[in-house]
Image: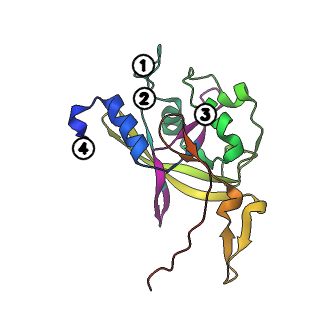
Amino acid sequence: MHIQFSDLSPAQVYATMTQAIIPRPIAWVLSENQSGSYNIAPFSYFNAMSSDPPMVVISVGRKNVEPFVGDEKDTRVNIKERKHFVVHIAHREQAAALTQTAATLGAEDSEVDRLGFELADMPGSVLPRISDCRLAFACELMDTQSVGDQDFIFGRVTDLYVDDQVVGKDAKGRIKIMADKVDPLGRLGGGEYVTFGEVLTVERPA
């Protein structure tokens, strides 16, 4: 099958790309609303961009549910105005909660309050983290770029929280984050996720 994107609507392109670019990491982003409450939302157009400086990028679209169609998403507004955010890596047991936070709500309707998330201090951030996430990145806004309806948020990572239960040592005695113990969720298309599977270790060229 050959699919020519110019023949598709934006919604069809989205559905096709999210089924074909798999699996994708999910940024579960906590930001601060104007009132001081907290917003949290998932984004799977997300990845690391560099390590010097340590940087991640998140692609954020616009709201597409009435009566908010065309409005900037709350995450975008919050980060633009207050500069700080925390990116979590969700694990298997959090799939249902993560999915609930994808709902389109009003700007001051806090998913954290609505769903009763327990928060904890996030080292290096003015914001808290979700307490039962095993990985969380404290980020500061570096830049934003707009392309069409998408806003690209570039965040500098200042600190990383890692649950002690998922940290070990490699063969050389260096710190190793044990991916199987993190048990991260990956995004597929539609309502599908992928959970952690087999680890393939392949010798890298010198």
Separation of marks 2 and 1 at Cα, in angstroms: 7 Å
- Quadrant of residue 42 in the image? top right
Specify which label sits upstream in the sequence, 1 or 4: 4
Q: Which residues are magenta?
A: 29-55
The residue wearing badge 4 is 2
Per the image, the residue denoted by label 3 is 99
Q: N-terminal of the two: label 3 or label 1?
A: 1
Instruction: Say if mark 1 contacts mark 4, CB within 8 Å.
Output: no
Q: Name the mark nearer the viewer: 3 or 4.
A: 4
Residue nearer the viewer, 147 or 98: 98
- SS at circle 1: loop
Is 205 drawn above or below residue 112 in the view shown? Answer: below
Picture residue at 63% right of the left edge, 30% below the top: 100
Q: Is residue 151 left or right of residue 169?
A: left
Q: Residues within 10 Å of mark 1 (few under 14, many from 20)?
A: few
Mark 2 or mark 3, which is nearer the start of the sequence? 2
In-front residue for pair 118/79: 118
Residue 49 visible in the current orientation: yes
Q: Is residue 127 magenta?
A: no
Q: Which residue is mark 2?
A: 62
| Residue found at the far top of this picture | 67
